[in-house]
Amino acid sequence: MYPVSNAFLDAVKANNRKYYWTGRITTTAGTVYEFDQDDMVKGSGYITSQCCGSTEIELGTVYAAEMGISLFSEINRYTLEDAKVELFYHLQVAGGSYERIPMGIFEVSEANRKAKCLEIKAYDYMVRFEKAFTSLESIGNAYDFMVLCSTACDVTLAQDRATIEAMPNGTENLSIYSDNDIETYRDVLFYVGQVLGGFFVINRAGELELRKYGNTPVLTVERKHRFTSSFSDFITRYTAVSSTNLRTQIAEYYALDPDDGLTMNLGVNPLLQFGLEETRRQLCENILNDLAVVNYVPFDSDTIGNSALDVGDVLSFSGGQADATKYACITSNSIKIGGRQSIKCVGKNPKLSQAKSKNDKNISGLLAQIEAGKIGIHTFTNASAFSVADVDTKIISIEFATTEANHAQFFGQVIVDVTAQPVTRSVTASGDVVIPSVNVDGVPVNPEDPEEEPVVIGSTEEQTITVSLPMSWQEDGHDAEVSETGRTS
């Protein structure tokens, strides 16, 4: 619930109220157009938001709020592409002054010119996360992934690191590997929201905010404040969660004692696929504990309106067919500018839930993946090198299973680093040495000095001598022969 004064809460419950709406349009070029309630076509304005689908409570949702309005204005519609629209609600409180509260920031997605008015449809900043996710592999805690998304999509975070890390699972390291079905940053937020046991919204200041289901009512809606109302005769509550572990091909089930409520199927969450078994169990049990506070009576009601209410607010009801001791949560909120406010809480009946065994519930997430008919490309690399020698060694082995006729292709690449063992060689070299004949009687030591005494060498005959010499050296061995054989079946 948006923080307002006690005077505002008193005024909004009064039998009579005085209020008006204003707004502001800011184009991408910086031009500002102010408008008030006189510029609005009566009955044309609305704001809708939700945190769940139409049938049951959900975790991790990232729904965008929608705003529509028709204005008596001559604004050039071509200048309104991606323009920012802000709406404000003004309520007169005691003393005659008006308290203003913001109703959200939206970006124009469509502007149509009619004869006398301009029709505008806009969405909040959640649509900015419809941007292709580019990080194939990432690791970090939940807040790290929130920062990653907010930075890439230019949306400010409403909560700081300390707030998120104080939550269960807030400090756990989460990993995203390349084998996942994440396409956009919005998908990343969905899986992070599941891990944190909540859902994401864009608040009234245009910031990304994580909210959780609670069990403390912020307001009591009395019978006189409701035009119509319908309450279910059962209470929606959850006592178990199931999550498919793709690594082990096992669907895991975590439950409270007694397990007599609904089961929340988390499907295949990429952030819950890796790590120790004990860590995965702790993550899922923390999610279950957050979900266990859901104890709501589904309802649908048209009220006089309280513009301070937001999706995720817990309410109590009194009077009429309402049970004042039970609570409900706003999962859908629709405000008509100048009209009624419709609020709703969805939920399933635990007694009438699908008649499946617990095991069937567990594997439904895995079956959804198998039946989707997706094309899968998987790349594997051995963690360490194989050492091969003269013995046949199997270095590639592929096994796969399919539930129907399929087409599979396998490609193997073997990168070989061949090293030959050095070989020592030795040999004995032998040969004949010929000594020529010599016949000299005497030769002076210094031929230029004829008086010097000559040296007598003597005379020999030609001789042949056989000489042997041992030798050794190292040389490269023979190249290894590498063969590759493959077989598919």
Image (cartoon, rainbow, N blue to C red):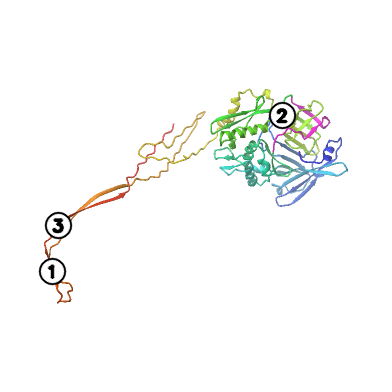
Write the residue at 74% across / 24% down.
Answer: 233
The Cα atoms of the two marked residues, 3 and 2, are separated by 116 Å
Can you tell which mark lies on residue 464?
3
> Which quadrant of the figure has residue 349?
top right
Q: Amino acid at mark 1?
A: Val
Of the image marks 3 and 2, the number of the one nearer the N terminus: 2
Of the image marks 2 and 1, the number of the one nearer the N terminus: 2
User: In the image as oriented, which residue stretches furthest toward the right?
Assistant: 95
Q: Where's the C terminus, which quadrant?
A: top left
Q: Which residue is mark 1?
A: 456
Total tally of numbered discs in the picture: 3
Q: Position of residue 95 (x, y in %)?
A: 88, 43
Q: Position of residue 215 (x, y in %)?
A: 73, 32
Q: Amino acid at mark 2?
A: Asn
Q: Nearer the viewer, mark 2 or mark 1?
A: 1
Q: Nearer the viewer, residue 222 or 335?
A: 222
Can you tell which mark lies on residue 295?
2
> Which quadrant of the figure has residue 16?
top right
Label 2 SS: strand
The Cα atoms of the two marked residues, 3 and 1, are separated by 24 Å
What residue span does the magenta drawing correspond to? Answer: 211-232
Q: Nearer the viewer, residue 422 or 412?
A: 422
Of the image marks 3 and 1, the number of the one nearer the N terminus: 1
Left or right of 126 in this view: 14: right
Q: Residues within 10 Å of mark 3 (few under 14, many from 20)?
A: few
Q: Nearer the viewer, mark 3 or mark 1?
A: 1
Label 1 SS: loop
Label 3 SS: strand
The Cα atoms of the two marked residues, 2 and 1, are separated by 130 Å
